[in-house]
Image (cartoon, rainbow, N blue to C red):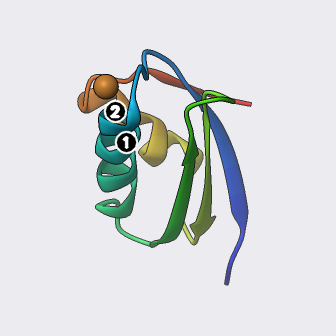
Amino acid sequence: MADSITINVSKMKCAGCVSSVEQALLAVEGVESAVVSLEDNNAIVTGAVAADALIKATTDAGFPATSV
Ligand SMILES: [Cu+2]
């Protein structure tokens, strides 16, 4: 199963932030891949996972997110 979920992620300022968000997303159970864009302020995640879990993970990491 490889559903794709896009979330908007705020407060990312540099590649380090992108990396932090990526790590936070990949740590969520069920996530297969996470592509984070600084330019678009979003993350595209594949895997069997709920958007709420992704939003909680990035928010806990200091980057509040919202579903698209
Ligand atoms: Cu940064």
Q: Quadrant of ligand 1?
A: top left
Query: Mark 2: which secondary structure?
Result: helix
Residue at (41% x, 19% y) in the render: 13
* Residue 59, image quadrant: top left
Task: Give the image location of residue 35, x and y in percent.
Answer: 57, 56
Instruction: Residue at 52%, 60% (x, y): give it.
Output: 34
* Placement of 37 over or under 26, stated as above or below: above
Of residues 16 and 10, the one drawn nearer to the viewer in this rendering? 16
Eyeballing the image, is 50 above or below 61?
below
Task: Report the residue marked by disc 1.
Answer: 21
Image point 43% across, 15% down: which residue? 11
Amino acid at pointer 2: Cys
Q: CA distance from mark 2 to mark 1?
A: 6 Å
- Residue found at x 39% / y 51%: 22
Q: Position of residue 36 (x, y in %)?
A: 54, 46
**Residue 48 appears at what percent x and percent y?**
57, 71
Q: Residue 65 shows which numbered tag?
A: none
Where 58 sits versus 53, above or below?
Answer: above
Task: Name the residue tied to disc 2.
Answer: 17
Q: Position of residue 4 (x, y in %)?
A: 72, 62
Q: Is mark 2 within 8 Å of ligand 1?
A: yes
- Residue 67 in sight: yes
